[in-house]
Image (cartoon, coloured by chain):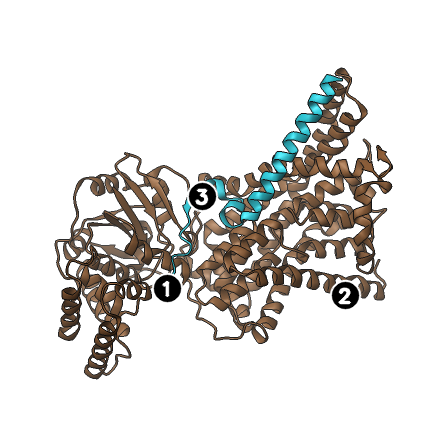
Amino acid sequence: MIANIVIGAAIFGYATWALVKFVNKSKKGKCAACDLEKSCSSQSQCGSSPK
Amino acid sequence: MEIALIGNPNTGKTSLFNNLTGSYEYVGNWSGVTVEKKVGVFKNNKGRLIDLPGVYSLNPLSKDEGVVTSFFLKEPVDRLLNILDASQLERNLHLTLQLLEYEKPALIGLNMVDVATKRGIQIDTEKLSQILGVPVVPVVARSGKGCDRLIEVISTSSNHSKVKRHVYYGNAVEDAINKIGIELIGKTDHSPRWLAIQLFEGNDYVKSYLSDLVEAHKLETLITQLESVVINEYNNVKSLANYIYVKRKEVIEKILKASVQKMKTSEPLSEKIDAIVTNRYLGMPIFLLCMYLMFMLTFDWLGTPLSDVLDGLLTGPVTIGFESILNAINASDFIHALIIEGLIAGVGGVLVFVPQIFILFFFISLLEDSGYMARVALVMDRIMESVGLNGKAFIPMMIGFGCNVPGIMAARTIETPRERLMTILLTPLMSCSARLPVYALFVGAFFVGHKALVVLSLYVLGIVVALILAKIFTKTLLKSETSLFVIELPPYRLPQVQSLWRSTWDKGKGFVRKAGTFIFAGSVFIWLLSYAGPNGLKVDMDDSFLAMIGNLFAPLLEPIGFGTWQAAASLITGFLAKEAIISTMNIIYFVPENASLQGLLSDYFTPLAAYSFMVFILLYIPCLATAATIYKETGSRKWTAFSILYALFIAYILCLVIYQGGKLFGLV
């Protein structure tokens, strides 16, 4: 019984965390949402256009 | 110490960056791989190296080129490392002269000396160094030859140019430079000469910088007067910017005469290959043939057998292993079903396609690294031009084949705002790798004899729809002038195993990581929705919450061939990430051992409906990450909403035509 509760809680806990993290990251768009992000150390230079 | 790495596009800056810092950045064999600056630490810890996007001039044409100019204006930089392509010295030196005018200590890395020698170009580096007044170090960035010497020179000597003025621009211009110099005394740390010349060239970034220091009307008057003087004096000069270009060119010709020897060589192999692969009539068929072979390998020859082995492993030993563990700990029915029918079905169903995804990425990397992709952009240019875009827009689209997000980011290299917007809107129509598992599943079930051909047809369909829409958009929503397409054809090269593997792994690992995070989470909740219903837990799946949600949309999908709640539910999850479609289907159509999902699918889809479903997946909506990127890049809710809605509309109409039209022709 205890094993069931522990496994269930672990799975649902991790799943909730992973889902929230994924949606937040995706919503950020750009580098954060990019599959190559981990291997790319770009520093954003956006918004540096002339006035 | 901050050292800026700068050079023309595709001169090997990123390769050199990786070699000097020991870090790994994404390297591609085409222009515009670096759209933002990157920072790394030198191997000997002597300073930080900043890799800037490739530019032909410090006077920016596009947004990513602006990164470089604003970097020069705003950020502290101690030294410049200018990398030159030895085989394209004439064009590369235009930037070098501008950098020397910036008057910071500089060093030149002469890259691709091997390519130049093959083309019969001999460069006297001593002489070149003497004329420019800065050290010139020959390197081969790809193999790392000469990099140690480069690090040594840049971190030890000060390298201020020994030559004070490289280009004499004539009395009128030099006077004007002096006038601006006087105005700027004590107001800026930058070289007044550099600022003045950039201003005369029409550099908007410098103009906006100077307008804070000097009264704008003074500058305007000075420029107008100077322009009329040079135009009057020189008949063939059209503008002040043009005059400065001509003056620099004269100096470059002298430099080349003194330091470069050209020997006669036979026509290089590169050009012989180009004559065939970029041929007006052969170019396109060759590209399609390459793609066809790529899909044959992915789906027939190599990928599917590997996937089958993995599938056997997951449905066999892995499932049995989990079963026995669950039995041993007396797991409840709920936990048992959650793990076997939810997690293993959902996550495993996606993991099965890892070999195919990796094979596809391997070939995309191979095509990129060998230099062929740049040729494809050239071939596409002729077609793209007829729809109001140019070949440059095809590069973001090709990157989009991997993942749409970096594809949309790469659209920054496009100069005109209208073309950039159009490329951003059309890139999501390119079939990204996350859609591949859906195709793999369906072609395996319905089109066994023609797997590669059917997948190829979907990729081509994505491109064709994008081209047709581009034509429609240019005629209606986004009317304006087109820009010119200039692409540098990089030399063909034999890809190195290490860089090929890294590039493949980088593209593919996102897929594996997603399986462990988002797909895991998605599988848990999708399974829960299919396990629970208004009448409690462990309901029949047709009475579950998931079925209720799916049934809301199912009638809408009836006319396009797949009006089931199962199809509707998987499409909804696909908005979060396209891979989720496949895990949802695996959970919904969960099959006991010995039966396959592919076999079961034929109860719900006909081949015609399956094709219609694949087309719908291809086009129907950009995923959440893509939509967010579109919003960030366009800065407009309106265009983001438009990109979602038009895709839905086009997908629906096209599927309607395919399904209903197919039925009329007697297809099933």
The disc placed on residue B657 is 2
Q: In this rendering, would B422 be left or right of B222?
A: right
Residue type of the residue flagged with mark 3: Cys
Q: Residue at x 62, y 58 (%)?
A: B429
Is residue B98 rendered to the left or right of residue B61? Answer: left
Q: Chain of mark 2?
A: B
Give the letter of the chain under mark 1. A
- Name the secondary structure under disc 2: helix
User: Up-down: is B560 above or below B153?
Assistant: below
Chain A tint as drawn? cyan
Please name which of the two marks, 1 or 3, marks the residue nearer to the observer: 1
Residue B316 image position (x, y, % from top left) = 74, 27
Residue B216 figure quarter: bottom left
Instruction: Please tell me the numbered disc located at residue A40.
Output: 3
**Amino acid type shown at disc 1:** Lys
As measured in the structure, the alpha-carbon distance from the residue carrying label 2 to the one carrying label 3 is 42 Å
Query: Which residue in the protein does label 1 denote?
Result: A51
Q: Secondary structure at mark 3?
A: loop
Asked whether B9 or B619 is in front, the reply is: B619
Locate the N terminus of chain A by quadrant.
top right
Residue A40, percent from left and from top? 45, 43
Tag 2: residue type? Val
Residues at circles 2 and 3 in contact by the CB criterion of under 8 Å: no
Numbered disc 1: secondary structure: loop
Which chain corresponds to the colour brown?
B
Residue B372 in the image: x percent, y percent?
48, 55
At horizontal 29% and vertical 59% (from top left) the residue drawn is B92
**Same chain for the residues at labels 1 and 2, yes or no?**
no
Identify the mark at residue B120; answer none if there is no mark: none
Question: Mark 1 Cα within 10 Å, few/some/many (few <14, many 20+)?
Answer: few
What residue do we see at 62% from left, 69% from top? B468
